Image (tube, grey):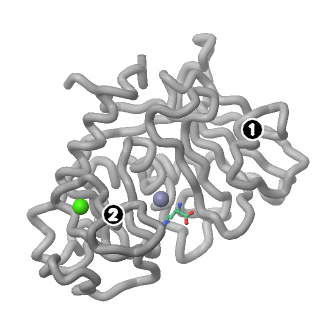
Amino acid sequence: SDYPTDIPVVVHVLDHSDATTISDAQVASQIEVLNEDYAGTNADLSKVPAPFAQLVGRPGLSFHLATQDPAGQPTTGITRTRTAAVDFGVDDTMKKRSSGGADAWDTTRYLNLWVCGLRGGVLGYAQFPGGDPATDGVVIATAAFGRRGSAKAPFDLGRTATHEIGHYLNLSHIWGEARVPTCDDTDFVGDTPNQLGPNSGKPRFPKVSCPAAPNGDMFMNYMDYVDDDSMFMFSQQQVERMHAALQLSRSGLGA
Ligand code: ARG
Ligand code: ZN
Ligand code: CA
């Protein structure tokens, strides 16, 4: 294909103490989730309600921990940094050694993923394509990373990274980005029905928030805000949008 499909990841683990560190096995559990969700082999994909089943998209992407560092040396694909900060704000300080974080590896070649404490119950955040190369990548809270160890219910199935990498590949929230809820706002994806605003928890199908969408909200989409066990699909046109982002903005991944 004319875009990268096997994406090298460097995981920057920032820990405050031995008690708050993340094991290699927990990192591996997160990579496993990404490989299931982005291949469309996740077991819960079968839970997609019938009216949305024909819209399911499989991105056909895989992820692996980098085996070579930017200098070409062998690596585990995990960096470990002991930091004075117990947690960080949504301000990119975790992405710089000079502010208690870890510097990015060449963001054109690697997907950089920082794991650290995040203040205010934030589960994660991502940078869309086209931003500052020095801060490109995704950040996941220690409490929402992988599916073992420090991961805490209901965000303990690794779906925060699935969601944030969706943003990294140019997907908006499924309801659009308007601050004032409206049924007219769009995520620029044709096959995700318009919905009024974010859903949370474990909604029951059907959940109708906008009258023009007969089957209601596609709340089981990774780009909504529901619990990890309640999100399990991308749509076909979301997949097309991610492939376009890989081709146009992220073509150097894996090079
Ligand atoms: N950026 C969102 C937040 O921090 C992430 C939502 C992820 N949702 C999930 N079920 N893991 O709130
Ligand atoms: Zn989001
Ligand atoms: Ca849509």
| Residue drawn at point x = 21 percent, y = 43 percent | 240
Q: Which mark is residue 112?
A: none
Instruction: Measuring from the top left, give residue 110's x and y in whole percent.
Output: 51, 28
- 9 or 212: which is nearer to us? 212
| Residue drawn at point x = 21 percent, y = 80 percent | 216
Name the amino acid, label 1. Arg
| Residue drawn at point x = 73 percent, y = 57 percent | 117
| Residue drawn at point x = 75 percent, y = 34 percent | 96
Q: How many marks?
A: 2
- 36 or 230: which is nearer to us? 230
Q: CA distance from mark 1 to mark 2?
A: 34 Å
Instruction: Assess disc 2: are there few (<14), some (14-19) or many (≥20) residues with their C-alpha within 10 Å of its C-alpha.
Output: many
Q: Reading the chain from its start, which is encountered first: label 1 or label 2?
A: 1
Name the amino acid, label 2. Ile
Q: Nearer the viewer, mark 1 or mark 2?
A: 2
37 left or right of 225 in image: left
Say which residue label 2 marks: 174
Q: Which mark is residue 80?
A: 1
Ligand 3 placement by image quarter: bottom left
146 left or right of 202 in image: right
Figure check: 56 above or below 60 = below
Report which quarter residue 153 is drawn in.
bottom right
Figure check: 19 above or below 211 = above
